[in-house]
Image (spheres, grey):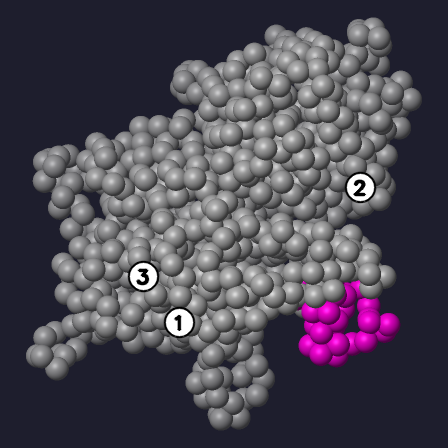
Amino acid sequence: AGWLADETPRLDSSVKGSAFEPTSPRATEPVVGPERTVDGFAKAFLDELNFEAGVALKRSTTTDQYLALARTIRGYLMADWLRTAERRRQNPTKMVGYLSAEYLLGRQMGNSLLATDLGDIAEQAMTSLGLDFNLLRAQEIEPGLGNGGLGRLAACFIDSLASMDVPSIGYGIRYEYGIFRQTFEEGRQVEVPDAWLSLGAPWEFPHPDRAVQVNFGGTTEQYIDGDGRTRPRWLPAWNVQGIPYHYMVPGYQNGVVNTLRLWSARATQEFDLEIFNSGDYAEAVRAQTFAENISKVLYPEDSTPQGRELRLQQQYFFVACSLKDFIDRTLEEDFDLTRLDERIIFQLNDTHPVIAIPEMMRLLMDEHDMEWAAAWEVTSKCFAYTCHTLLPEALEVWPVELMTRLLPRHMEIIYRINEEFLDTVREAFPGDELRVRRMSVIQEHPERAVRMANLATVAGVKVNGVAALHSELLRDKLLPDFAALWPNKFTNVTNGVTPRRFIRLANQQLSTLITDTIGPGWETDLERLRELEPYADDAAFTESFRQVKQANKDRLRSILSQRDGIELPEHAMLDVMVKRLHEYKRQTLKLLHIVSMYDDITSGRVRREDVVPRTFVFGAKAAPGYFMAKEIIFLINSVAKTIAQDPRVTDLMAVAFPANYNVTLANKLIPAADLSEQISLAGKEASGTGNMKFALNGALTIGTDDGANVEIRELVGDENFFLFGMLEPEVAALADRGYTPSSFYESNPALKRAIDLLASGHFTGGDRSLAAPVVDDLLYKDRFMALADFQSYLDAQARVDAAYRDVDGWTRSAVLNVARSGFFSSDRSMRDYLDRIWMPKS
Ligand code: C3B
């Protein structure tokens, strides 16, 4: 057990340029963990199985074995976890508190094995016990505690923070049910609850002993305090407890393990005791259910918020728990809270946690006796806000009526923040009452409501967008009045993805090829992928690169065959569009391309030998209440089925739509892709992060000039990217002129044919009405201008075909995509947050 005695943290592979110098660890109590040998691992595993679970190996189920394996692996992380925490406690510095309602973590086992470098030992240990390691790994249900890009981004960020040894903590909600499991019935999406905890939860550590109370409702009043001062206080009507659950966030082979703290809601004892004592047993149980509802389920809306009361309860619940946890438990007891900003910066992941701002004011004033001015002084240094969208309907507003009912004290505080803020505006822009109205934290129409983005902008030290274009539009179009008042508040941090999960784990063969070519260490210094550039013309390297891609495609074919019964052709370009189903992302544009290709072949308009065979893969969940998104899913499945049954085309095209796209499936799909579809209407996709994962795995992008596509194209080069579509200013101009989709339909024969064929019922068993919702929307509304970009898209797809025929040229471009995408590591994003927002030098 040499590694246990080893008190030097293994920081040699920590990310270059980390803002934090590792401090000498002072573990006061050595933690004894299992030995890093096959025997040691096997013994630890049997200990878990026999003594913790109380099961004999011979009698154990696959689930028992999976749980014991998970607990064994986490045992190896324990010493580093405790040591990291102790080191931080001994040397308190400014921390990052990442506040996010979503963490789309993906499976934990593979990542933990990678972080500890225990993969081989674990596999051999399982084999020595006669167990199938891969079967056990496949048991894990990923914690789907997020919807899509925003939640996955949070997971990438905490991975990077640990790999860079940044003192940080992630705060969020432990939903009992994560994002629904998607199934298809007759081509239509059916949602099944995601009971991810049902088999046991081997990766979490509940701490009911550290419960926090959270209050809701009631009223406020003025009272006279001990010093004769009149002060407001909150008389809440009900409360719940937040139970923290801790999750390890291991850094990449650097001896660091950070913490993710997710809160689960429980009924407080007072709450139900009172009712119990009144003799109403049923009411007491109902009350319990009511309290526990708060963390019951993840809202499955993505990008468009549902303004439901329970959602505001969730937001306040986790934020109140987290602030209290930080102030009461993480800070030293006598810490001077006027200096809070020296010890914490809370990053607000979109508007979901923005209620933290008035909550901090309330804590400082009502519970820590601070005056307004002092409380505001420090609060306005402790938060920064990331905006993840531009769609106006996606900006959260909470009705004043609801806010007053649920959080009356917070509403008062928000009013006062707004009053003082509007004074500032009036001073800066005298007589400009229209501007005052636009900037107010309170909107008056269509109903009085709190604009959470405005509140975050008023209080935040910085406001950032998530890609260069997005940050520009955020500043100049979404919040221009704020930018005029505070130009320096606005900044950009382009998103990134963790290379550990999305290259090293997802694409082991490519990782080996990279390491063999440029040596180790690129996983934490991703710009080093540049060293691959010279190999883009190296025959041996490009041959290996192609073999890796083919192997990944073969693996995907076998996975889809087993998982979904989908049989894909062996040799075809793999053209992939995976992301949430949203009209602005334009899955319908992809569908129009597919239908157009089908029509070209079946009508003999193209010669068969001129067709580049393609396999199209979709992966997308629709929000359960999003009618049009669900209709689009149905239509894609209908087209897929018709194509699969039409012998005229089966050798040239196939469409696959495996159900339940999630992080686990992404890890199999992305490494296999040749072509990455990033085709949102320009100006609508804030960043995209899937686009980065594809480029890093050697897919070429066909994309609009939107989000991070802009930066991908700049870096990989125009000749290695298929650009199409209107630019954002052109989109804006067309919208101003008035957009009529039907005019594009009338004037473009290829488009007309594709739409007519869709509308004819050809793909829907002859029933025209089944295609009508989507077709009619395209023809008469088409809010995201798919028809306007259709021809440009078709032309770009023709360029893709031509490029793909040139095998060497394509491979060269693919290699260059990998070599030039190192910028998109989330380590770089974290460095940017550190330099520009969290710990700026100046
Ligand atoms: C997403 C955006 O739609 C993506 O463009 C972006 O890459 C990610 O966030 C991460 O920044 N997003 C989301 O997933 N959910 C929201 N509510 C808003 C934005």
Is residue 50 one of those drawn in magenta? yes
Which quarter of the figure has residue 341? bottom left
Is residue 265 one of those drawn in magenta? no
At 73% across and 43% down in the image, what residue appears? 659
Q: Note whether ligand 1 is within 8 Å of mark 3.
A: no
Numbered disc in front, either 1 or 2 = 2
Of all residues shown, which one is farthest toward the right? 647
Instruction: Establish if 359 lies above or below 777.
Output: below
If you read the primary sequence from the N terminus, does the residue marked by circle 3 or circle 1 appear first? Answer: 3
Q: Which mark is residue 92?
A: 3
Q: Read off the magenta span.
A: 42-71
Q: Is residue 453 visible?
A: no
Which residue is nearer to you in this view: 735 or 41? Answer: 41
Three-letter amino acid code at the position of disc 1: Val
- Label 3: few (<14), some or many (≥20) within 10 Å? some
At 42% across and 48% down in the image, what residue appears? 349
Q: Position of residue 173 (x, y in %)?
A: 50, 61
- Label 1: few (<14), some or many (≥20) within 10 Å? many
**273 left or right of 450?**
right
Q: Position of residue 616 (x, y in %)?
A: 74, 27
**663 left or right of 487?**
right
Q: Position of residue 14 (x, y in %)?
A: 47, 46
